[in-house]
Amino acid sequence: MPAVYSMLVSLLDVAGHASSSLRFIRDSPETVWALASLSLFIDTFVYMLTVSMLPEILQDSMGAPESANGVVTAMFGVGAVLGCFVSGILSDRIRERRGLQMISSLIYSVSGIVFYFARHYYQILLFRLIDGIASGVACTLLYASIGDVYPANLLAFKVAIVYFCNNIAYTIGPICGQRLFDMAGVKGPAALVIALGLLKLVALFVFSNDSLAIRSAVRSRAYVSAADDSTFSKSHESVASMSIPRLLMQPPVIISTLSIVTSIGIQCMLEGLVPLHLVDKLNHDQDNGITFVILGLVFTIMVPIVGKATDSLIEWRGETMRYYAMMFGAVATVCSVLLMALANSYAVMMVGYAFFAVADLCMFIPAQSAYGDFVNGANTDSMARGYSISVFAWA
């Protein structure tokens, strides 16, 4: 009996230690950051997973015209806009992030089920619409969650690492999707979409607490340790939220939104123009996708560097350095595009394109982190609304 009793006590001690460790993980800002990175990886991976096979499905299997491809892409954008604004307003109003993120996980799985049984064009449209809604909700709330728990001088690097995961998914998604499609048809990628949605749901349920609860706990601890600091005491008070139209009237939000629209817009434009320029002007018709592989590598390598540099500048000289970084990115983008336009060889063209990738990040990363910093600095309960504007800008 003493041996059995000792064993039971040991098991209880182990269970108690495991429970304490899990509680620590659930209440950690680093967990919010890690799950946000996983969430954006899944979001981009799900989108890119089906990109390469959709033309084959639409034209070869369903007999749809090539113009149908653009409509399918537009449906994703419509869903993303709908999802970002609804989730942004709802999340701030009911003070909930985690629950809505779990719902977005289920929506991913629902989109996978629709894709699994898709036999007609309208079902592909429905799949992309549902996937867009899930993406709009997920992207709005993952960025809002990071903004909830990190201050200005750490936010850009955290956002950069999340975007790093996006770049990895962007690179490997089409390859994995095409392999699965070749092996199992539509059902292979669709089953993976369903599984990824459920994986994200389980990860949020088991390992995550709501970022607003973590924010409250972190601020409470800081408030106690800085009880004599009248500035912090004032910032600890809760205030009313801003509506989306009012947020759009704030200079930091306007500047950041324009920066994201410009950054993503020029990037998408060049993705279409660069292959044509290589063939028409430089007679480089044996590319085999190496140009975009080089661009992806530059993005992947430089994104954490740009994020860390932005945080260092803000810590050194204050929040205004974020906007100087965005200004530098805009000027550097113009110079890189001019270099690409005047290039007389493939090597010079690729130097210009690599330079563009760095300049593009200098606009995008500071802008993407600016929403959270503005909401924290203004002490307004509008984090999700702010990032819904960000998601709308790229959607």
Image: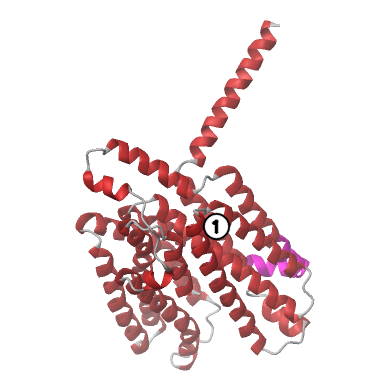
Looking at the image, residue 381 sits to the left or right of residue 293; the answer is left
Looking at the image, residue 379 sits to the left or right of residue 201; the answer is left
- So how many labels did they put on this image? 1
Residues drawn in magenta: 168-192
* Residue 359 appears in view: no
Residue 14's place in the image compared with 128, above or below, is above
At 28% across and 78% down in the image, what residue appears?
Answer: 331
Residue 340's place in the image compared with 240, above or below, is below
Q: What colouring style does the render use? A: secondary structure
- View extreme (left): residue: 317
For the stretch drawn in magenta, the main secondary structure is helix
| Image spot of residue 195 (x, y percent) | 69, 56
Residue 289's place in the image compared with 23, above or below, is below
Q: Which quadrant of the structure image shows residue 330?
A: bottom left
Please name whichever residue, 82 or 11, is drawn nearer the observer in this view of the structure.
82
Q: Which quadrant of the structure image shows residue 144?
A: bottom left
| Image spot of residue 214 (x, y percent) | 45, 44
**Residue 336 painted magenta:** no
Q: Dot 1 corresponds to which residue?
A: 39
| Image spot of residue 209 (x, y percent) | 52, 45
At 31% across and 36% down in the image, what residue appears?
Answer: 224
